[in-house]
Image: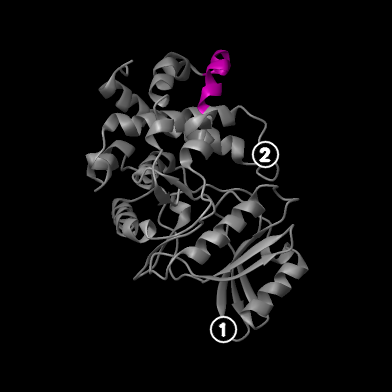
Amino acid sequence: MANGYAQGVRLPYAAGPLHVRRWVERELGASVVEALDATGGMSPGPAARVVGADGRRGFVKACGTELNPRTPDLLRTEARVLSALPAHPSLPRLLGVYDDGDWVALLIEDLDGGLPASPWRRPDLDRVSATLSDLRHVLDDVELEGVPRASASAPIFVSRWRELPALRARLEPWWAEHLDVLAAHAQRAADLIDGDSLLHWDIRSDNVMLGEHRTVLVDWGQVRVGRAWMDHAMLALDCSISGSAVTTGELARTDSVLRHLDPDDLLAVAAAAAMSFKVRSRGPGAVGLPTLVATSSRWAEALVPYLSEALDRAGAPAD
């Protein structure tokens, strides 16, 4: 069964605060005559393509603390990152920022095209993989202070997975049987993700726009400094998460970066991620994110086929 895009419950653009919508019109220089709401992504805030009376276009994403206390800070981070990124066909242009201390809104160029199919298809995967490789030298030249290190600020790979053994009695048979070996592999993840490269850190099918002549990475609120191959690894994990016929292992064997990686390294980060998703699927959820628990459960289970294959190949990790 196809897993599809990550999807939360968004506030429609027309239901957003009037002062934010008035700001959008000031930035556009014209009244908004059309707003097409986006449905992908987990944020509870509005996200919409807007068209002004004079034909000017933009993409608006916004959120206030009452919808989710963390999302406005993610938008602030994204604004800072987009302001620092150079002009490049695979990077979106920031047109304006609104921040009143509560609500934050970004006006970004409206991109032609649409999201890749989910589940992923091979041509789209190859296109995005090539874009990640092409952007590596561009991102390496970006000067941006204060970006968190992945090894210190990525609980999915560093710490959350450690909570799963305490839930052993509540786990399904496959998870209970493989818990110890998964944890042994996940132990390596924190060291593996550490590095000095600027990373998008949220590569998923709903964070890419495919146009006729451009492949653009969007949603830059999660940036980290870490190991250069991690964006490629996240693309590979999203193969399983999306339900693609191209498996995580298959992409890892053909991706221009991952094919040079020790397969056990990808297994380690996948084990940590899957265990973390499993932990979150047993949790209470989060404010404004009503689909988070179910989505986390779906992602954890979607990684089981790859993990089973990889564990059979790898066996128990060395002490």
Residues at marks 2 and 1, CA–CA distance in whole angstroms:
38 Å
Q: Quadrant of residue 123?
A: bottom left
Q: Which residue is mark 2?
A: 286
User: Residue 277 at what x, y percent from top left?
Assistant: 52, 32
Q: Amino acid at mark 2?
A: Ala
Residue 268, quarter of the rendered image: top left
Viewer-side residue, 222 vs 302: 222
Main secondary structure of the magenta stretch: helix
- Secondary structure of the residue carrying numbered label 1: loop
The spot of residue 30 in percent (x, y) is 65, 83
Contact between marks 2 and 1 (CB within 8 A): the answer is no
**Residue position for label 1:** 55
Task: Tell me if residue 105 comes above or below residue 260 in the rendering.
Answer: below
Q: Quadrant of the N terminus?
A: top left
Q: Image quadrant of residue 266?
A: top left
Q: Position of residue 242 (x, y in %)?
A: 43, 43
